[in-house]
């Protein structure tokens, strides 16, 4: 499904494929040979999403772009099933396995691998050809790798990366009531979306 959002329409070349059950919303530009499989969502909120040639976005993955953190995906990238790419840059030939999660401001270097259920945290930079093991967390710039049970070590790096400011544009300690009121207003812009159908798929 192609959707116009905030006055912007997706750009889908004839050589690309968007499954009927996938959603491509707003200022999303797909490269030649891109494949967006069933259930995947590429949504340009108030920013952009660009996807390079021959990249495959697999079933039920999410790619989200925001104004301060557009989603920029390189060429020949695999975004695995249920992966979450939120305002991140993914360089050419990277591999994001099932359930991988990339947060705003993060960068995955060329030919790097983020394995099953691994995380690259906000404002963290993974070097080219680096590997984040299954379930591990990459945090910092350049990223340090931690097993998930090392929460205190992760937090020691993470707390300086300003997750609430980066993701929600609020200072740490802001109440969830205020954060979610702001989020409700922000995502309320979808009430004016225009369904374009499946042209170009």
Image (tube, grey):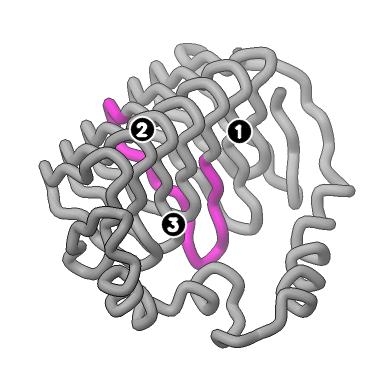
Q: Secondary structure at mark 3?
A: loop
Q: Quadrant of the N terminus?
A: top right
Which residue is rendered at x = 18% and y = 63% of the image?
144
Q: Which residues are magenta?
A: 63-77
Determine which residue is flagged by label 2: 52
Question: Does residue 50 appear to the left or right of 133 in the view shown?
Answer: right
Q: Quadrant of residue 10?
A: top right
In depth, the one of 103 and 56 nearer the eye is: 103
- The answer to whether marks 2 and 1 mark residues whose Cβ atoms lie closer than 8 Å is no
Q: Residue 69 in magenta?
A: yes
Q: Residue 121 in magenta?
A: no
Identify the mark nearer the N-term, 2 or 1.
1
Which residue is rendered at x = 71% and y = 16% of the image?
198
Determine which residue is flagged by label 1: 41
Label number found at residue 103: 3
Say few, some or many: other residues with alpha carbon within 10 Å of mark 3 (under 14 / 14 to 19 / 20 or more): many
Question: Does residue 165 appear to the left or right of 77 in the view shown?
Answer: right
Say few, some or many: other residues with alpha carbon within 10 Å of mark 1 (under 14 / 14 to 19 / 20 or more): many
Question: Does residue 87 appear to the left or right of 11 in the view shown?
Answer: left
Disc 2/disc 1 C-alpha distance (Å):
16 Å
Which residue is rendered at x = 44% and y = 36% of the image?
99
Q: Quadrant of the C terminus?
A: top right
Is 78 located above or below residue 194 in the figure?
above
x, y percent for residue 2:
70, 27
x, y percent for residue 76:
27, 26
Q: Secondary structure at mark 1?
A: strand
Disc 3/disc 2 C-alpha distance (Å):
19 Å
Label number found at residue 80: none
């Amino acid at each position: 499904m192609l959707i116009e959002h905030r006055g912007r329409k997706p750009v889908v070349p004839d050589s690309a494929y968007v499954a009927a059950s996938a959603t491509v919303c707003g200022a999303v530009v797909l490269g030649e040979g891109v494949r967006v499989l069933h259930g995947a969502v590429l949504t340009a909120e108030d920013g952009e999403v660009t996807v390079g040639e021959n990249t495959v976005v697999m079933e039920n993955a999410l790619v989200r772009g925001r104004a301060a953190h557009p989603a920029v995906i390189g060429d020949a990238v695999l975004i695995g099933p249920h992966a979450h790419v939120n305002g991140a840059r993914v360089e050419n030939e990277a591999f994001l396995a099932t359930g991988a999660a990339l947060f705003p401001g993060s960068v995955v270097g060329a030919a790097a691998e983020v394995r099953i259920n691994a995380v690259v945290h906000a404002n963290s930079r993974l070097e080219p050809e680096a590997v984040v093991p299954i379930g591990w967390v990459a945090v910092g710039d350049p990223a340090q790798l931690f097993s998930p049970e090392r929460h205190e070590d992760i937090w020691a790096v993470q707390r300086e990366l300003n997750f609430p400011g980066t993701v929600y544009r609020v200072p740490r300690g802001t109440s969830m009531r205020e954060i979610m009121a702001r989020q409700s207003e922000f995502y309320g812009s979808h009430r004016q979306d225009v369904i374009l159908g499946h042209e170009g798929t």
